[in-house]
Image (cartoon, rainbow, N blue to C red):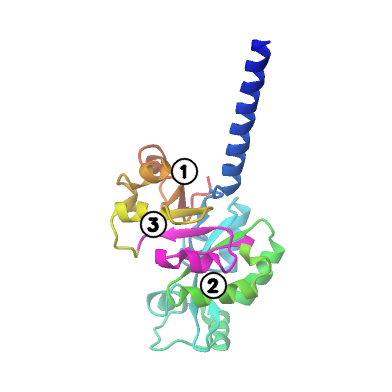
Amino acid sequence: MNKIRTGLALLVMVSAVVTHYGCIQKKEFKVKRIAHAGGGIEKKTYTNSYDALNYNIKKGFTYFELDFSFTEDERLVCLHDWTHSFKRSFGFSTENKVTLTEFKKLVQEKSKFEKCTLDGLSLWLQENPSAYIVTDVKEDNYKALQIIAAAIKKSTNRVIPQIYDPNNFKKIKKLGYKQIIWTLYRYQGDDTSVLDWVKTFKHPFAVTMPKQRAVTSLPLRLQEKGIATYVHTVNSNQEKKNFFNKHHISEIYTDFLAQ
């Protein structure tokens, strides 16, 4: 009789543990490799283009980070910035932003690759149901994420916002996005501050960081708390292995390393 009771007690305990970890599993961030700026194409980076998206989804990527900038008429296009990136894309410098119509004309006439616009990206996502977008918006991130949420079908599942200021986590979570990545490249706080902030975040979320921060003890300390981490941007297989094996990074942002 005692053996039966002991067996039943163990069964209840195992069931409770399975249930507990099942709940945790549902909250975990889906860690996938992220194609930086749409991924590289023809040895080029930062194209933020449909060409890159189409090329890299065939290579096996499903998560694509894209840069978004506001045009002069407050529309979102996939461009890193209006200075260096604009010149790299179109071959000349501009002192001012251009309108969406002007941007599309420049893409058609001056760019080798067809850079994305928000409306076009919405259609591309419908045509590629396995794909997810990770946003990088340097100017008025919250406003951009509001616009993206309205423009992209099922955006709260298909789009993963990056945030720069941890104070904005709850505000952006309220927009309905299921997953969020906190990127540390603008954050000036120390590791203790990072660890204090993540205690206040609601799962699922992840933390991404530049290489110089990824070689510290921070990734391991986050891993010990069950938090996924990324490092950007990694294009060497040896470097990738080092970050995984020595520095406890979960995954990478990369231009070229699909595997």
In the picture of the structure, the residue carrying the numbered disc 2 is: 145
Q: Calculate the distance from the C-alpha at mark 3 to the C-alpha at mark 1.
A: 14 Å
Q: Give residue 197's mark.
A: 3
Q: Residue furthest right?
A: 127
248 over 188 or under it: above or below: above
100 over 252 or under it: above or below: below
Cβ–Cβ under 8 Å for marks 3 and 1: no
Instruction: Depth check: give the residue in front, 259 or 109.
Output: 259
Q: Could you tell whether 250 is left or right of 212 in the image? A: right
User: Which three-letter amino acid code belongs to the residue tagged 1?
Assistant: Gly
Which of the 4 quarters of the picture holds residue 25?
Answer: top right
Residue 233 visible in image = no
How many numbered marks have been drawn onto this rendered protein structure?
3
- Percent x, y of residue 85: 42, 74
In the picture of the structure, the residue carrying the numbered disc 1 is: 226
Question: Dot 1 surroundings within 10 Å: few (below 14), some, or many (20 or more)?
Answer: few
- Percent x, y of residue 117: 58, 76
Q: Calculate the distance from the C-alpha at mark 1 to the C-alpha at mark 2.
A: 27 Å
Q: Could you tell whether 95 is left or right of 178 in the image? A: left
- Lower position in the chain sequence, tag 3 or tag 2: 2
Q: Which residues are magenta?
A: 157-185
Q: Does the magenta segment cover residue 161?
A: yes
